[in-house]
Image: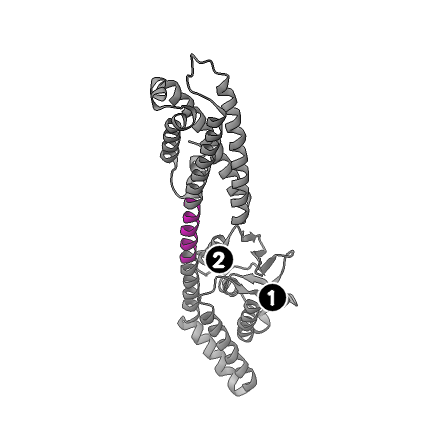
Amino acid sequence: MYKRAAFKELIGFDHTWMVISIIVISGVAFPLVFFNDTFANYLKYIYINVLIGLIFSSVLVLGNLAVFYEISNKYVSDIQKFKRMIIVSMSGQFIYTIMAASIMQMIPDMIFKGTISPENTIRAIVGSMLCVFIVNGLYLTFYYMNALKKSIKKQELLKRQNVESQLEILKNQVQPHFLFNSLNTLISLIPEEPDLAVDYVQKLSKVYRYILEIKNSKLIPLQDEIDCVKAYLFMLEVRFGDNLIYEIEENLETNSQLHIVPLSLQLLVENAVKHNVISNRKPLRISIHKSGTDQLQIKNNLQVKSLSSPSTGTGLENIKSRYGILGDYTVEITKTKSIFSVTLPLIEVQ
């Protein structure tokens, strides 16, 4: 049946039997209602009536489905889809019915005994329009029901992905060694650099508050994400000193319409610190900058710890999945002998 897999994706189920049923019902009914003056005449030549009716309805229904499929995939706006579908379908079926009626008038009486009068032609046009309206109405109803179902499913999946991301970051950050290192850094700062210790605590508080505040967000303004990752990098810089070097492109956050998946930058920075050597001889360099007009690249030099546990890729997969749920967005991952970089799409929200 016409584009079974494609229509299953559009309306949510295999429409084969529905199409066959519509063709059979309309094929049997059309000659009776539109091409014959009496029921007795219809029954007398029922085989040729039904044959012609099935041919007529097959072209009518399948042609209408072709229009529905092309318009559904071409136009983004629902209003555009509806208008274009009505105009193209109705005008197409009007022309087709006129042509079919003209052809039927040329069929010899010995083959087809129906009466093709101007009145019946008008009835046939009205009937084909009604059929088009019903078929389009059915498919549009199933289309929007399926779209709503998909939307709800995506919302739930995105919510779950966000929760998983938050739990993963919180889990990593509250591990004993993280708290131990943070407290050790803080203890060493208090007597020698009390002002810096205050800044450290403020940045730590800012990171945790941000994680808790964005728990229900699918996207977050780039400026908010940059502010959070700056606070997180400040903490790491205090801990690692000159062994950690980072660079964030200036004025990244000037465009308030650009959004990003929440916690993606922090997660990528955390991965870089977790899996790479950071020492006097081998400082870790992290850079965050625009790539083109609608992408953000996070890059670090690659110097993998020999004793570190292999990366599971959970964080990256989480980010890729969340972007995939939001739309046709691709997260680009590049790995060479010396560089590891991830390029994230920037999504413009009006």
Q: Residue furthest bottom?
A: 191
Give how far apart the Cα atoms at labels 1 and 2 are: 21 Å
Q: Amino acid at mark 1?
A: Ser
Is residue 145 part of the magenta span, yes or no?
A: yes
* Residue pictured at 59% horizontal, 58% vertical: 297
Q: What SS does tag 2 mark?
A: helix
Residue 9 showing in the rendered view = no
Quarter of image, res 250: bottom right
Q: Residue furthest top?
A: 110
Quarter of image, res 58: top left
Q: Amino acid at mark 2?
A: Ile
Q: What SS does tag 1 mark?
A: loop
Q: Position of residue 61 (x, y in %)?
A: 45, 32
Q: Nearer the viewer, residue 81 or 264?
A: 81
Range shown magenta? 142-156
Give the mark nearest the N terminus, 1 or 2.
1
Q: Nearer the viewer, residue 327 or 69?
A: 69
Q: Quadrant of the C terminus?
A: bottom right
What label does residue 319 carry, if any?
Answer: 2
Residue tagged by mark 1? 256
